[in-house]
Image: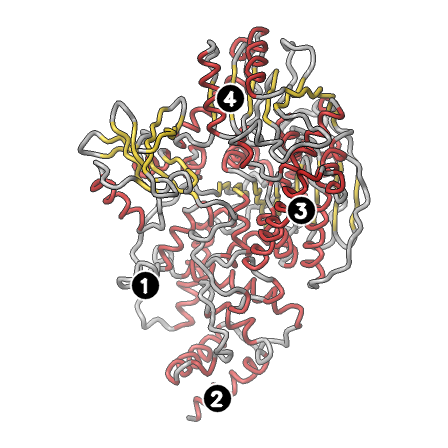
Amino acid sequence: VEGDQKVGDMLAPLFDAMDRHRGAILDPILFHHGRLRDPGQPNIVVDFRSEGLAAARTFVAALSPLFQATSLPPLRSSATQAISWRLAGLVALADWLGSNTDWFPYERPDWPLADYLEQVARPRARHAIAAAGLAPARPSLTGGFQALTGLPVSVAPTAAQAWAETVAIVDGAGLYVIEDAMGSGKTEAALVLAHRLLQAGRAEGIFVALPTMATANALFSRLAVIYRRMFDATSQPTLALAHSAATLHEGFRQALKVDLRNDRGYGNDSAEATATAQCTQWIADDRRRTFFADVGVGTVDQALMAVLPATHAAMRQLGLSRRVLIVDEAHAYDSYMGEELATLVEFQTALGGSTIVLSATLPATIKAKLVDSFQKGRTARQNPPVLSLNSTAYPLATAVGAAADETPVRLRADLARTIAVHRIDGPAAALDRIIAHVATGAAVVHIRNTVDDAMEAVAELRARGVDAMLFHARFALGDRLAIEQEITRLFGRNSTPEVRKSRVLVATQVVEQSLDLDFDAMLTDLAPIDLMIQRAGRLWRHRRESRPMAAPVLEVVSPEPIDAPTKDWVGAMFPRAQWVYRNHAILWLSARELFTRGAVRMPDDMRELIEAVYGDNAEERLPPSLARYWEQAEGKNKAAAGIAAMNVLKFHKGYRSANVHAWSDDLDIPARLSEPTTIFRLARWDGGVLRPWSNDPDDRRAWRLSEVSVRSAQASARAPASPAEAAAAVLEATWRQRHDQAVVLPLTDGQCVSTLVDGRDRNLRVNYDNRTGLTFNSAKV
């Protein structure tokens, strides 16, 4: 009793100090896996049984002298939220490291604690941190555009890159926004600025978030060449790729040096993974490892997981907060993801991290929302003072701290140009234009807004003697990667006049922003103005000695934007594509601006074009027949933003169960609000064995390379009584153990046909080949 009283006296100051903010300390420690405390049980301590309290007291009494522990000082109310989020991430990280039996094998139980700490725990902890790649690499002392790119001094930085070299770094966390044209070197400018933040001790690494896997793959390959220049020559910096198919990227596979293992859970509970399994899985699975790499590249979804109620959210926050977060193509996200992105900026700022935002076509409303979120994080207030953004210049660089400093920058000289805009009256006329361009030897792209329209265009061109290539998202991943490589060879920066001559590519939106392609002629279905600008960025993108055309022309397949269009203004010309961009009012405004101007001047028209379509007074110029599309879209956008606002974590509420109603495994929670999709894995069926469509020595990789993603309304399952049903069921049972819901799609050898079930439970016949992709027959079976 006397001993217990002494321990109680020792613990009293600790719990007294935590009395008001006990949850901010204990919740992150006891519930760091995202399974939070029931809010109906506010007093954690009294929930322990007597033997648990006795063990806790004994433990604290033994450890306090070892760490020279003192009671906690009173916490400032404004600091409790940040402490709770940081502590949750830190405890999860420590638990991940400490529970790994490779780094911390079990020891005999009779070690004196002091000896164990000094002779075993601390040396192994140092080794674990080094082995996990958690010790930050030292930044290089030299910096700037030339030092990081390796280009000679004769290649001068752009104005935006020069701004990144010289702009004053704001006190504390900062928000930096670079608005510049496509192909202007915004990424290099961001890296120059991020490196300066590393040198100033404001961060330990960099994470670049991009809109698609293709853009992430492309940047990873670029950074693999230059990222070491950011760090001291004696350091060994890490570079990682983060998205769901990152292990299919050959460059990342070569960089990945960890052992992938499927450890069993505690006892027979497969859902309760061991800490070692989580550690090994986490460090090998790029999506979570990346946030502690010195340089990480991934899809924005992976960064957004830091502000969703996912089990590893706090660990992601911890990693990101010590990195410069670079968000590329910030205009490319819908209302749901826009709300998530704004929340991510608030968390990043509140936890001390800086953010760099890049965009070629950023509407003023989105920029203002990001600045407001930055202010919330910086001031710890939900209604912070508004920072004025006044400049309408383009290009523009903005540094935001306690105030906003907007700096107009010049466009790179070779990007300043005028692109003529011509209207093409329908898809048939577009095919005639393609035939005419081919006769001149031009390299042509035809962008259609649906896969079926693209397939139809290719079939008609081939029937007329033009061997057009086809590229869309309904190819098996392995075939898609091969097509990307071939397209880059034919139309990329280094393509020669001989290989480009009279080549035709018909593609969907997959060519808008992921690949560095350059075409002599472009025909495109009408799309919202920001996407039209992105598409135009692939027209005459690179300098060439000669072109088969006198000047760049953007040929837009579109109905005429007359003053009084009918309500089926879009649907009459595009019966399929009318469902892709459902706000036909935005399409009308975009067409009106393009065809009234007759040309797009870079950079003079960029800001005006975006604000004419997305600005505050755009709705006032709509014809009455299309106003309902605007109203419906606005309602959906507000609903999506509202759903996101309910789903995201709330920084000001701290790491508590009251923050959100439920937390999920981070492999199961989506970052995008989109139509349900079904992942099919194509399999060759010879009557006895199912083999992946794509060949690879690694069986798991071969199956991933065989994937095709389809809207579940279009196809949701394999048809009943499939001849390969038994073999498919065995494969799927193994996948389900890994949270993998993919469906086997058997294709008969030779014919490559199969039967699926659509969203209405009707059977439909499909076939596949590597030139056309997955084709749905119109007739149901």
Image position, residue 64 (x, y; %): 49, 76
Which label's residue is closer to the chain start, 2 or 3? Answer: 2
Q: Earlier in the sequence, mark 4 or mark 2?
A: 2
Q: Amino acid at mark 3?
A: Leu
Give me the disc on residue 106: 1
Outermost left residue: 688
Callouts 2 and 3 close, C-beta under 8 Å: no
Instruction: Determine which of the numbered discs, if any, sits on residue 271 in the image.
Output: none
The amino acid type of the residue labelled 4 equals Val
| Residue corresponding to mark 4 | 506
Q: Can see residue 142?
A: no
Q: Secondary structure at mark 2?
A: helix
Q: Out of 54 and 680, give the one closest to the viewer.
A: 680
Which mark lies nearer to you, 1 or 4?
4
Q: Sequence order check: which comes first, mark 2 or mark 1?
A: 2
User: In terms of secondary structure, where does tag 1 sit?
Assistant: loop
Tell me how far mark 2 sits from mark 3, CA to CA.
49 Å
Q: Quadrant of residue 528?
A: top right
Residue at image point 62% right, 45% down: 633
Q: Residue at x 26, y 43 (%)?
A: 731
Which residue is label 3 attached to? 197
Q: Nearer the viewer, residue 469 or 13?
A: 469
- Give the residue type at disc 2: Lys
